Image (cartoon, rainbow, N blue to C red):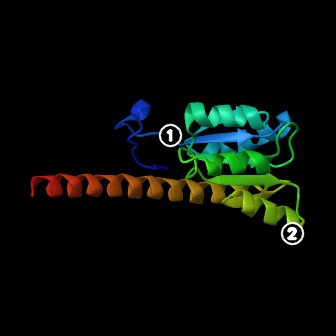
């Protein structure tokens, strides 16, 4: 599956494999999600807690984040809130992976900025379908942003010439 080209400085002009950050404090859950994603042509980046996740986001700028909610130190809700609150990372799609199914938890997830949910135990087909959809959406969003920046630059140059 191809998701297009990127204009990021470290992968400029080359076909890129999407980067997916997987955040879960349970090593078995982390390994299971990585195994489920093996069929996709993607790079997975593991993180074991919220702070490690935030560091990984700033270092690698993933294309998608699979985020556990219930973690020690910092909940997935807080991690998501911080990611979505930063202009640099706000457009990274976040899928919360959770055993929680109370309406209040879903509401908290939406308020923190999550883009989607996957319930535990994770269904492989559901996970892959949602991941592919979010990666396509991210690719199109990035392409739109590049196009708008290009048009803005053309408009600036033509205004400057007049």
| Dot in front, 1 or 2 | 2
Q: Residue 46: horizontal and vertical position, in percent?
A: 71, 33
28 to the left or right of 46: right
- Place residue 50 in its image quadrant: top right
* Residues tagged 1 and 2 counted as in contact (Cβ below 8 A): no
Residue that mark 2 sits on: 103
Q: Residue 66: horizontal and vertical position, in percent?
A: 70, 47
Q: Is residue 73 above or below residue 85?
A: above
Q: Mark 2 or mark 1, which is nearer the start of the sequence?
A: 1
Residue at 79% x, 35% y is 49
Residue at 64% x, 33% y is 56
Q: Nearer the viewer, residue 37 or 21?
A: 21
Q: Is residue 64 above or below residue 147?
A: above
Q: Residue 125: horizontal and vertical position, in percent?
A: 71, 58
- Place residue 102 in its image quadrant: bottom right
Q: Residue 13: horizontal and vertical position, in percent?
A: 34, 38
Residue at 78% x, 38% y is 30
Q: Quadrant of the C terminus?
A: bottom left
Residue that mark 1 sits on: 17
Query: Helix, strand, or loop for circle 2?
Result: helix
Q: Nearer the viewer, residue 2 or 45?
A: 45
Q: CA distance from mark 1 to mark 2?
A: 35 Å
Q: How many labels were placed on the picture?
A: 2
Residue at 64% x, 59% y is 129
1 to the left or right of 144: right
Q: Nearer the viewer, residue 161 or 52?
A: 161
């Amino acid at each position: 599956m191809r998701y297009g080209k990127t204009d990021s400085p470290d992968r400029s002009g080359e076909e890129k494999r999407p980067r997916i950050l997987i955040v879960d404090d349970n090593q078995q859950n982390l390994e299971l999600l990585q195994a489920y994603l093996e069929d996709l042509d993607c790079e997975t980046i593991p993180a074991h807690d919220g702070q490690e996740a935030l560091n990984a986001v700033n270092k690698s700028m993933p294309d998608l984040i699979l985020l556990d909610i219930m973690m020690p130190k910092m909940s997935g809700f807080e991690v998501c809130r911080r990611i979505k609150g930063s202009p640099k990372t706000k457009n990274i799609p976040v899928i919360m992976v959770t055993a929680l199914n109370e309406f209040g938890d879903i509401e908290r997830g939406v308020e923190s900025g999550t883009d989607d949910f996957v319930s535990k135990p994770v269904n492989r087909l559901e996970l892959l379908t949602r991941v592919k959809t979010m990666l396509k959406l991210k690719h199109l969003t990035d392409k739109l942003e590049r196009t708008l920046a290009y048009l803005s630059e053309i408009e600036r140059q033509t205004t400057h010439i007049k």
